Image (spheres, rainbow, N blue to C red):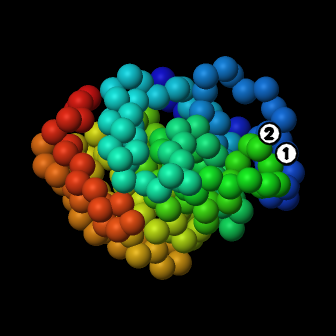
């Protein structure tokens, strides 16, 4: 199943777009994001997709500080890129007293992880990293099950404007290392390929 996009008035303000996103009744179990100002409704990720995210999450819990969390369904706001994005994993300090319960500012994230789905891999490869970099998120891990050169994980960092620098790539079966503050090696041989 592929994603559905919902068009909106191009004159609509960011606040109006977010209000529509928050108040609309979306199909249960779907993933609803605003990507480059367009509301995108995707089916829930498949089992193998979730296995990869869960494996990374399990490893991350061993290295993050006690006051940080790893969130699977947390939306992060990037108003400058007209984005309300829901990465597969967000690692961020826990915060009390945020203005809203529906999302956090993307700048609070220390790491975001995306696992590609066949139907919307382009978003994970192009649109989302541009938004994450623009928000200044220090690290972006892309696990691309459908990569043009085969399944691989790529770690991006050093955001400048809306561009990341690729830090390292590991084909499935190899190890990819996350730098400080994580200092973690992730063995991609544990990832199901498709």
Residue 176 locus on image (x, y percent)? 22, 55
Q: Which residue position holds label 1?
A: 19
Numbered label attached to residue 22: 2
Residue 78 locus on image (x, y percent)? 66, 61
Q: Residue at x 58, y 37 (%)?
A: 73
Please, what secondary structure does the residue beneath circle 2 have?
A: helix
> Residue 27 versus residue 75: which sits nearer the camera?
75
* Residue 173 in view in this figure: yes
Classify residue 52 by image quadrant.
top left
Residue 24 locus on image (x, y percent)? 81, 32
> Residue 40 versus residue 179: which sits nearer the camera?
179
Please, what secondary structure does the residue beneath circle 1 have?
A: helix
Position of the C terminus, as image quadrant, is: top left
Residue 94 locus on image (x, y percent)? 62, 53
> Residue 167 versus residue 118: which sits nearer the camera?
167
Taking the view exactly as shown, the residue that stands out farthest to the front is 66
Q: Is residue 63 left or right of residue 185?
A: right
Q: Residue at x 61, y 27 (%)?
A: 30
Taking the view exactly as shown, the residue that stands out farthest to the bottom is 160
* Residue 149 in view in this figure: no
Taking the view exactly as shown, the residue that stands out farthest to the left is 173
> Residue 166 versus residue 104: which sits nearer the camera?
104
State if disc 1 and disc 2 touch (CB < 8 Å). yes
């Amino acid at each position: 199943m592929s994603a559905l996009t919902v068009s909106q008035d191009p004159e609509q303000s960011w606040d109006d777009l977010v209000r529509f996103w928050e108040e609309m009744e979306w199909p249960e179990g779907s993933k609803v994001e605003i990507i480059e100002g367009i509301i995108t409704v995707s089916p829930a990720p498949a089992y193998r997709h979730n296995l990869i995210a869960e494996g990374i999450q399990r490893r991350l819990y061993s290295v993050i500080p006690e006051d940080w969390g790893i969130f699977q369904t947390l939306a992060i706001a990037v108003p400058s890129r007209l984005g309300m994005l829901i990465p597969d994993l967000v690692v961020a300090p826990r915060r009390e007293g945020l203005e809203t319960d529906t999302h956090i500012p993307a700048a609070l994230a220390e790491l975001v992880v995306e696992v590609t789905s066949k139907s919307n891999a382009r978003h994970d490869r192009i649109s989302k990293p541009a938004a994450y970099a623009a928000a200044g998120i220090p690290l972006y891990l892309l696990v691309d099950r459908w990569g043009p050169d085969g399944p691989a994980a790529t770690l991006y960092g050093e955001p400048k404007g809306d561009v990341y620098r690729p830090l390292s790539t590991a084909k499935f079966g190899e190890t990819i290392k996350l730098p400080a503050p994580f200092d973690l090696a992730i063995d991609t041989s544990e990832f199901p390929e498709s």
